[in-house]
Image: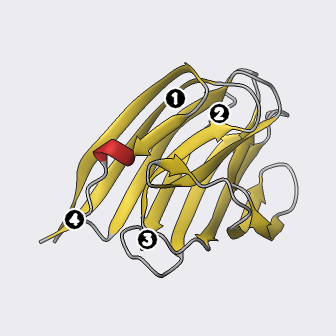
């Protein structure tokens, strides 16, 4: 049987970014879950992005390889991906009514030295054109150092509001 153990949480209120883990990181887990509830941007037409922490500092090197599938409520789907990015895009939103990003990120191999860090994510968002989108994908951080958290922020401007939580998966 497994259970989620809350390790860290943050409420954004005109915040430049939200960091989970770092000083609250617990190495007793092999898999972690980050939840995002209604991350509303302060600026219009921006992307919610994330970076993993190495020794408590966001890794902004061009070391993220990613791929995802976007379901679009108003048109056909899209395949996206790339290599050597400096962040992972989780979804886009704007400042209109109801425009925000919500979803989950699973983190793997965070406490293992000598191997890539891995994440999967699933988000749902109302973009800056008020179109419903859903994004499912994954990414690698090709830095092989031990990681100890995640930072989440909008590509421009602050996070006006939102709830963020970090859990460890406890297996008994």
Q: Which residue is mark 4?
A: 28
* Between discs 2 and 3, the one toward the N terminus: 2
Label 4 crowd bin: few (<14), some (14–19), many (20+), radius 10 Å: few
Q: Which mark is residue 162?
A: 1
Q: Residue at x 68, y 58 (%)?
A: 135
Q: Position of residue 27 (x, y in %)?
A: 27, 62
Kindly indicate whether the residue at mark 3 contacts the one at mark 2 (C-beta within 8 angstroms): no
Quadrant position of the N terminus in the picture: bottom left
Give whichever of 72, 144 is nearer the camera.
144
Q: Which mark is residue 108?
A: 3
* Between discs 2 and 1, the one toward the N terminus: 2
Image position of 129 (left or right of 154): right
4 vs 1, front mark: 4
Kindly indicate whether the residue at mark 1 contacts the one at mark 2 (C-beta within 8 angstroms): yes
Measured Cα–Cα span from mark 3 to mark 4: 13 Å
* Between discs 4 and 2, the one toward the N terminus: 4
Measured Cα–Cα span from mark 1 to mark 3: 24 Å
* Between discs 3 and 4, the one toward the N terminus: 4
Q: Which residue is mark 2?
A: 100
Label 1 crowd bin: few (<14), some (14–19), many (20+), radius 10 Å: many
Disc 3 is placed on an element classified as strand
Give whichever of 67, 50 is nearer the camera.
50
Disc 1 is placed on an element classified as strand
In the figure, 15 relative to 125: above or below?
Answer: above
The residue furthest top is: 14
2 vs 3, front mark: 3
């Amino acid at each position: 049987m497994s259970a989620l153990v809350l390790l860290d949480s943050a409420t954004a209120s005109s915040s430049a970014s939200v960091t989970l883990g770092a000083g609250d990181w617990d190495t007793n887990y092999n898999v972690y879950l980050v939840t995002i509830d209604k991350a509303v941007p302060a600026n219009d037409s921006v992307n919610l992005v994330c970076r993993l922490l190495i020794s408590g500092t966001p890794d902004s090197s061009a070391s993220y390889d990613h791929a995802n599938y976007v379901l679009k409520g108003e048109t056909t789907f899209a395949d996206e991906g790339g290599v050597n990015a400096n962040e992972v895009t989780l979804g886009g939103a704007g400042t209109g009514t109801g425009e925000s990003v919500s979803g989950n990120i699973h983190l793997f191999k965070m406490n293992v030295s000598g191997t890539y860090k891995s994440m999967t994510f699933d988000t749902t968002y109302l973009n800056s054109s008020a179109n419903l989108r859903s994004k499912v994908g994954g990414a690698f951080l090709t830095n092989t150092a031990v990681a100890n958290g995640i930072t989440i922020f909008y590509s421009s401007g602050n996070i006006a509001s939102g709830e963020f939580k970090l859990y460890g998966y406890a297996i008994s």
